[in-house]
Amino acid sequence: MNINFTLISQAVAFAIFIWFTVRFVWPPLMRAVEERQQRIADGLAAAERGKQELEQAHKRAVEEMRKARESNADMRTNAEKQAAQIVDEARQESARIIAQARTAAEAEAAAAAQRVKEQLRERLADLAIAGAERILRREIDAKKHAELLANLKQELR
């Protein structure tokens, strides 16, 4: 065999192999590589979008927590104010009730004292009338008159 013929036949076979590969094998391989590159690019873009969405969600969560803290502080302040107001109102109401009770007790005590005074006046008037009756029933005698007055004094005590 001749080395030139072998070289030329191998070169022709190699050229046919290259043509066959470029024509039939290469396009599906390139499509698969391109599809794979596209999927990788899409995956990287999705990962980037997910990362951005995660950052935005984190920012929203931090903002919501800040708002919740502010709202909580406002509610606590309002509750403390309302509690203080309720306590003040209760104190005022209790002071008013105590004042009313004192006024009622004082009025009742004054009424009782007035009744006692009236009873004493009536009793005094009765005793004075009784003393006058005794004096008038007896003869008018200075000695007896003095005794009756002394008895009356003792009764009044």
Image: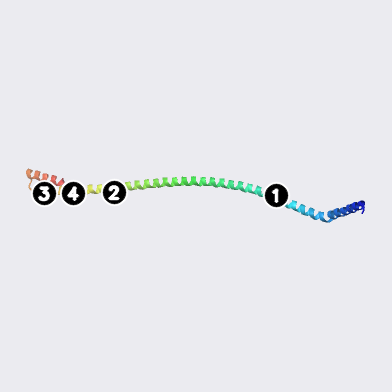
Q: Amino acid at mark 2?
A: Glu
* Label whose residue precedes the other's in the sequence (4 or 2): 2
Q: Are marks 1 and 3 in contact (CB under 8 Å)?
A: no
According to the picture, the residue beneath numbered tag 3 turns out to be 134
* Label whose residue precedes the other's in the sequence (3 or 2): 2
Q: Which numbered disc covers residue 92?
A: none
Where's residue 60, x and y in %? 60, 47
Q: Residues within 10 Å of mark 2 (few under 14, many from 20)?
A: few
Q: CA distance from mark 4 to mark 1?
A: 116 Å
Q: Which of the two residues, 125 or 153, is positioned nearer the viewer here? A: 153
Q: Which numbered disc covers residue 123?
A: 4
What residue is drawn where x is 9% and y is 43%? 146
25 above or below 90?
A: below
Q: Residues within 10 Å of mark 1 (few under 14, many from 20)?
A: few
Q: Give the number of the mark in front: 4 or 1.
A: 1
Q: Which of the two residues, 103 or 118, is positioned nearer the viewer here? A: 103
According to the picture, the residue beneath numbered tag 2 turns out to be 108
Q: Are marks 3 and 4 in contact (CB under 8 Å)?
A: no
Q: Amino acid at mark 1?
A: Leu
Where's residue 64, x and y in %? 58, 47
Q: Is residue 45 left or right of residue 142?
A: right
Q: Is residue 85 left or right of residue 112?
A: right
SS category of the residue bearing label 2: helix
Q: Are marks 3 and 2 in contact (CB under 8 Å)?
A: no
* Label whose residue precedes the other's in the sequence (1 or 3): 1
* Label whose residue precedes the other's in the sequence (4 or 1): 1
Q: Residues within 10 Å of mark 3 (few under 14, many from 20)?
A: few
SS category of the residue bearing label 1: helix
According to the picture, the residue beneath numbered tag 1 turns out to be 44
